[in-house]
Amino acid sequence: MILSGRCARRTLFACVLACASPAVAVPGTPVETIEISARPISQFHIGRDETRFGPLEFVGGLEMTSQARDFGALSAFRFLKPGSDFIGVTDTGFWFFGTITHDADRRPSGVSNFRLQQMVDASGRPIDRKWEADAEGLAVRDGIATVGFERDQRVAQFKIDPDNMKAPVRQLDYQVPAEELRQNRGFETVTHANAYGQHAGGLIVVSERSLDEAGNVYAAIIEGPHKGVFTVRRDGDFDVTEGAFLPDGDLLLLERSFSIARGVKMRLRRIYGESVEKGAVADGPVLMEADMGYQIDNMEGLDVWTRDDGALMVSLISDDNHSILQRNLYLEFILHQD
């Protein structure tokens, strides 16, 4: 059949589109702005007015709720501005951004400008399978977010753009042999060492509960001049959920324990910085432990920052697992060095 000029042009145009379509960029996922209701928490030890718990002084907290279906499962966060703007990841495969607000007495008062965006694959399509997007650990530096994923074990880096988070720009060698990482017990801690310490700001990763033959937790220095595997001594039935380096070079670890009989516990442990070395077993003292008699839940996220008055601050968040029996909490403490 012979086509008319107009039909021929239409057919040619359709063919061009069909041939070009595989190369057309797939747009990223939309950013969803959602409203967060935040109920202030004034007592850490339920029913008691004490504020000092070892070297930690409770400042205040928030219980966060939202009508948005995707809100929750907050597994890691870091501040982009000290105590204010933050970035985070969920273990259901979302990025989140927002701002913690404070009242005149420096207590946390609310969460504003909260946004969610679903993670995407290399072609820009949303990742819908949880096992591919189980984000658990997060580190931030120089506009780059480094994320630890478990199940599909990997450590990946992303350019930070709150309006359009894209696919990773780089995958990192995490040093620990892949066969040593347990399916749902991979890297929960991803953090930068101190810039002027022995690891020159390099990335450190610690698994949740991937254990060596001695029962210690696999970890690694994956950047810097002394890359290599080390372990963290496992103390009791607590698992590692996040960590951050303190200004003096020690590593502050957040740990969690759970049993049907006693519920959930949380613990903060200070790992001596000099023990974070290739081939070493890192260890250090417990600073604070809390059970269900305190305002805690499934505590999974931690960051350390310095307040404008010089106070060294520790902020924690919990992961509600999208369960009506759990809560999304934000807690704030001063870490006293005396």
Image (spheres, rainbow, N blue to C red):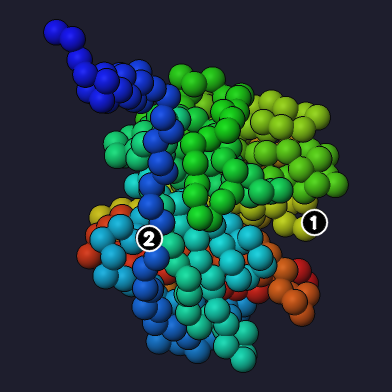
Query: How many residues crowd mark 1 within 10 Å: few (<14), some (14–19), many (20+)?
Result: few
Residue 113 in picture, x, y percent from top left: 48, 71
Instruction: Give the structural element (helix, strand or loop) at label 2.
Output: strand
In this view of the protein, which residue sits in the foreground, 239 or 186?
Answer: 186
- Toward which corner of the image does residue 25 lie, by quadrant? top left
First in sequence: mark 1 or mark 2? 2
Residue shown at 37%/60% (left/top)? 32
Whether residue 47 is situated above or below residue 270 in the rendered picture: below
Residue 32: mark: 2
Residue 233: mark: none
Residue located farthest toward the front when viewing the structure as drawn = 5
Is residue 271 visible in this depiction of the protein? no
- Toward which corner of the image does residue 199 lie, by quadrant? top right
Residue shown at 36%/55% (left/top)? 73
Query: How many residues crowd mark 2 within 10 Å: few (<14), some (14–19), many (20+)?
Result: some
Residue located farthest toward the left when viewing the structure as drawn = 1
Residue 248: mark: 1
Residue 41 in picture, x, y percent from top left: 44, 82
Residue located farthest toward the bottom when viewing the structure as drawn = 104
Whether residue 277 is situated above or below residue 304 in the rendered picture: above
Instruction: Give the structural element (helix, strand or loop) at label 1.
Output: loop
Is 332 displayed left or right of 39 in the figure? right
Residue type (three-letter) at the residue carrying disc 2 = Glu
Count numbered badges in the picture: 2
In this view of the protein, which residue sits in the foreground, 202 or 243?
Answer: 202
In this view of the protein, which residue sits in the foreground, 155 or 29?
Answer: 29
Is 54 displayed left or right of 89 in the figure? right
Quadrant including the N terminus: top left
Residue type (three-letter) at the residue carrying disc 1 = Asp
